[in-house]
Image (cartoon, coloured by chain):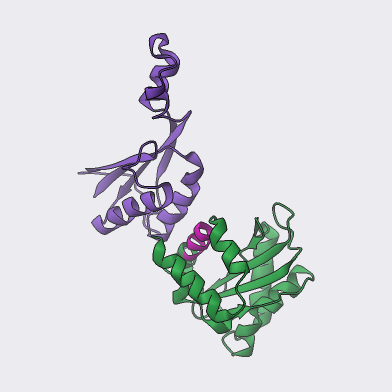
Amino acid sequence: MELLIAVINDVDRMDEVLAGFLEIGITGATVIDSEGMGRVLSHDIPIFAGLQTLISRSRPQNQTLFSVINEPEKVDLAIALLQDVCGRFDDPATGIAMTIPVHRVVGLAPELGESEG
Amino acid sequence: MKLTEYLEAGLVVFNVQPGEVADILSQLIDPLVRDGTLSSSERVLEALLAREKVLSTGIGQGIAVPHAISEVIHSPQLIVGLAPQGVDYHSMDDAPVNVFFVLLSPPDRAGHHIRLLARIARLARHPEFVDALRNCETGEEVVSHIHEYEQEHV
């Protein structure tokens, strides 16, 4: 079981990402609005204001997605999907994805069953 | 999950004609009525109309995704409909619809139904995919286009 954390810079892509998650059988995720470090520094700390190096690496706002995923193959599919939708995360200002092992979870919604409408 | 697992050339309806929503839906499910797949077209139509009453499946950008789950459907069915001139379908953006994806599933495949809907919703977000679909002239072209696009994307 892994926790997938993905920061998506183009927030308009999030609904496509979530639709794709449904497709591959990931039916639960939490999405929060977030801000990158470059954005916070360049806007909130005067000495960094106007530094193009920082500004060009960030967007006004991004979103961060959290999802606990049971099967390793779904994790692989989710990461492939994220980059299919958002562009390769190796490219600047697209996003970042990481996973960490999860040892215990409570309150996880069951997988989408065939009989659920 | 690929749409082309469920779509064949004979399930593409060309030249969908304008009319009431029920008339349009009747045209769209006609191939399944004619080949005997649907045991009761009336009940399928009722199910589709019931879903439209909740909220139009005309999702905007010229696309509609009428769908229903019904016990008279025995296996997932997908139909693509094209209306080159566009037809009024009470879409969310009030624009005429020229591409329909009709999805029908039995109750025991409801989870699968949702995944297929998600697939359609995701593909429909790609303007180049939908534009090319609009220009298809044969069922084979439609299937081939969707297949190619699905090969390129996760």
Q: Position of residue A117 (x, y in %)?
A: 51, 62
Quadrant of the rendered structure where residue A115 is?
Answer: bottom left
Instruction: Please state the horizontal and vertical placement of residue B147, each as a whole percent of the image.
Output: 45, 72
Provide the letter of the chain coloured purple.
Answer: A
Query: Which colour denotes chain B?
Result: green
Asked if residue B42 lies in the magenta stretch, the reply is no
- Asked whether the viewer can see residue B124, the reply is no
SS assignment for the magenta stretch, majority: helix
Query: Residue A26 vs residue A15: left or right?
Result: left
Quarter occupied by the C terminus of chain B? bottom left
**What quarter of the picture does the N terminus of chain B occupy?**
bottom left
On the image, the x and y values in percent for residue A4 come to 30, 44
Residue B24 appears left or right of B12 = right
Residue A22 at x, y percent in the picture: 43, 57
In the picture as drawn, the residue positioned furthest to the right comes out as B19
Q: Is residue B129 visible?
A: yes
- Which residue is located at x 33 percent, y 54 percent? A80
Give the residue at the far bottom of this rendering: B35
Magenta region, residue range: B116-123
